[in-house]
Image (cartoon, coloured by chain):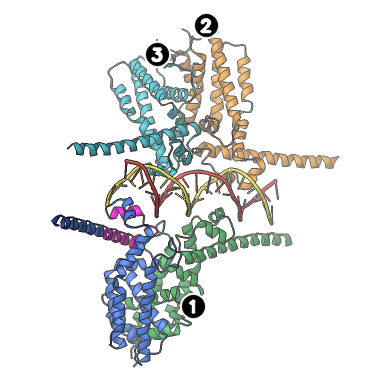
Chain colours: A blue, B green, C orange, D cyan, E red, F yellow
Amino acid sequence: MSQKLTIKSTISRKEKEKLKRRKTILKSALYLFSKKGFFKTKMEEIAKKASLSKGLLYFYFTSKEEILEEIVKEIYRGFMERIEKIKAKSISPAQKLEEFIKFEWNFYKRNKKFANLIFELYQEEGYFLKKGKVKTFREVHLREKEVLKNIIKEGIEKGIFKDYDPELASFIVSAIFHFVFMKSRGIKSHEEILELFLKGILKK
Amino acid sequence: MSQKLTIKSTISRKEKEKLKRRKTILKSALYLFSKKGFFKTKMEEIAKKASLSKGLLYFYFTSKEEILEEIVKEIYRGFMERIEKIKAKSISPAQKLEEFIKFEWNFYKRNKKFANLIFELYQEEGYFLKKGKVKTFREVHLREKEVLKNIIKEGIEKGIFKDYDPELASFIVSAIFHFVFMKSRGIKSHEEILELFLKGILKK
Amino acid sequence: MSQKLTIKSTISRKEKEKLKRRKTILKSALYLFSKKGFFKTKMEEIAKKASLSKGLLYFYFTSKEEILEEIVKEIYRGFMERIEKIKAKSISPAQKLEEFIKFEWNFYKRNKKFANLIFELYQEEGYFLKKGKVKTFREVHLREKEVLKNIIKEGIEKGIFKDYDPELASFIVSAIFHFVFMKSRGIKSHEEILELFLKGILKK
Amino acid sequence: MSQKLTIKSTISRKEKEKLKRRKTILKSALYLFSKKGFFKTKMEEIAKKASLSKGLLYFYFTSKEEILEEIVKEIYRGFMERIEKIKAKSISPAQKLEEFIKFEWNFYKRNKKFANLIFELYQEEGYFLKKGKVKTFREVHLREKEVLKNIIKEGIEKGIFKDYDPELASFIVSAIFHFVFMKSRGIKSHEEILELFLKGILKK
DNA sequence: GATGAATGAGACTTCATTCAT
DNA sequence: AATGAATGAAGTCTCATTCAT
């Protein structure tokens, strides 16, 4: 029995090692994808950055594209739940919007490298090698926009927000986040963004 | 003399043909770049779409990358002058902003395919094959943001706009345009965007 | 009849023009072949240097390779006769050798560009595009060596030259000429070469 | 410890395999370059001759041109040292000349295929694709001629050789070697060449 | 005759993926 | 598990040659 445990813990350590390796690969790939783009990044480079051999990448992932997909999955882990939780809260739409924006702000701040990649992910189906891949992003992004749209819709219905097209409004929030994170370096907090979106730039 | 004219017009026709071909190539390339991305588009495909041989592409352009650069140049022809003209007008900053947004709206509406490409163009130096290429986009985009920032700064100084960071504000306008054009299909006019930006979404 | 003559002279002038063109092409090609080598020289470049269109080259010659062959033919025109004449003279082998060397010296001096090309021409069958082409060079060169060998053989038989292998001796003379002309710039006359070959470098 | 050694020897075997492959490639390339010339030889052919895939060539070398350069380097390995050693010996210039000629004779005899290539290597800068490449040949050849010139100069100064231009005399020796090796098949030894060069062909 | 636009075969090279060790 | 040598499909680009005008 003691042996069993030993074996078990050995396996467990092995498993841990494996998971750690996996993470190292994803991290290295993310770094390179965000810096040079998906197509310009070579498997060789990912391997080198992760300090392992090219061949081993194929033990952990079936293809370059799968690495990308797994990056997206990993990053979005828990993302949806958080979003849904905000949606479900019994607070005013304005407060929901604030929480939403705050959450996204922090999320993209934590995942700045990933934000760089997003532009490539936005490409149409067929942009990446095999169809149907990199679908997580599409799914998450769709749901993200959906929730945002609902918040705005709710605000309009409750007479808090003006009667803008929710599609447009949610689009604009999306746009701001992705764009700001990809390119801006100087913006320190999300509050100005929220304020601008809420009250506009015009004085009085 | 009449013969002279005939000759002249013959030459002219040939030149016209050539220019037309050139345009066909650029159009085909733009279509494919915007649909599949720059890297996934093959020279073979561009040739096929333009109904000519692969080799001929290299008669008109020196490389795939040059095709991209020429697309950008072609599209931005006259763009800067229009932007500068708006900047120079003696109207209020709010009106300038309106004209600016209106112009960009129409521009990107006219060049929807190009708007799709923009995400790739935003990539860092070194993303494309040879350094220093595809610089037109970078230049134009920089100036575009500069002008916008100036308009907003002017508005703030004249007490018309609130004291937001002009960098942030101009960034947001940029973001909205590029994003909206790339992905949105339903938005019919720019007026709502302008209004939202000016007055915010909050009622009262 | 006067008309006939006029026509004749018109044709004749045309013919002359054509021949002149032909020569211009060959000259341009020789210049480029000798400078950059046969393979690195493009038809486009030959056309440009000869101030005519690429297409027209194919009116005068059937292929790039034929241009090379014609260059060789043109240059070697009369060469064989001169060589044979020297061989047939009733003078001593030493004098023949002198005349031979003098002739070759002047020949390669006059055709320095061609001398540069010779290295490529020495390549085996199959080096150039279609087999059996550029044969003139091979033929002339073979005969040239043959004659030289005979002169030396004659000298040996008459007890004037030492009993060296005529093959070797003739080879050395060939070598010297082609090599000296290709690379040396400073040698002013052939007399030293002849002297060296006749008496050797050793004093006494 | 014995295991360590085994591992070591395993690594060593792999390294050896790799070096062997490298040599096979160079050998195949040399064979083809010397037979058909550099430009007419295709990477495909080199791969086929070496019984491996085209792609693998680029694992061992960065380009076709590098293969050529490496061939030259490989062949000239140790060549300079030998030449310098001859130069430094305290023997008479005539003896030095003899040793020099003997050495070169044996060298080019051992590397007959390479001797064929030399004619292409003699081409001007810019003949090969990228400038600055295939420089080893140029360097070695320059030094080779320099040493030979010095030997002859020394001979003249010591009153052993006649007062010929050392430039010319060294040129002739070079010429003979490269030429003789490239084309002659029948010459059995270098002694006749040396003798001819020393004493000339003229009897008495 | 003359032009130069057009073709297309084929070259070099890259790189994701596989596989023997 | 791990390596990195090996593969081969596919991409960009070149250029001799052809051909419509």
Location of residue B34 with respect to D161 vertically, above or below: below
Q: For mark 1, what is the residue?
A: B106
Q: For mark 3, what is the residue?
A: C202
Location of residue B1 with respect to E14 vertically, above or below: below
Q: What residue sits 51% from the left and 57% below the top?
A: B43
Q: Is residue A54 left or right of residue D191?
A: left
Chain under disc 3 = C
Query: Which residues fall within the magenta stretch?
Result: A21-49
| Residue C132 coordinates in the image, percent (x, y) | 60, 31
Location of residue A29 with respect to F15 vertically, above or below: below
Label 2 vs label 1: CA separation? 100 Å
Mark number for residue C159? Answer: 2
Q: In the current view of this chain or complex, which residue is farthest to the right? A: C1
Please check the rendered image and state whether residue A27 is part of the magenta-colored stretch, yes or no.
yes
Within 10 angstroms of label 1, few (less than 14), some, or many (20 or more) residues? few
Q: Is residue B90 visible?
A: no
Which circle's residue, 2 or 3, is located before the other in the chain?
Answer: 2
| Residue C17 coordinates in the image, percent (x, y) | 69, 41
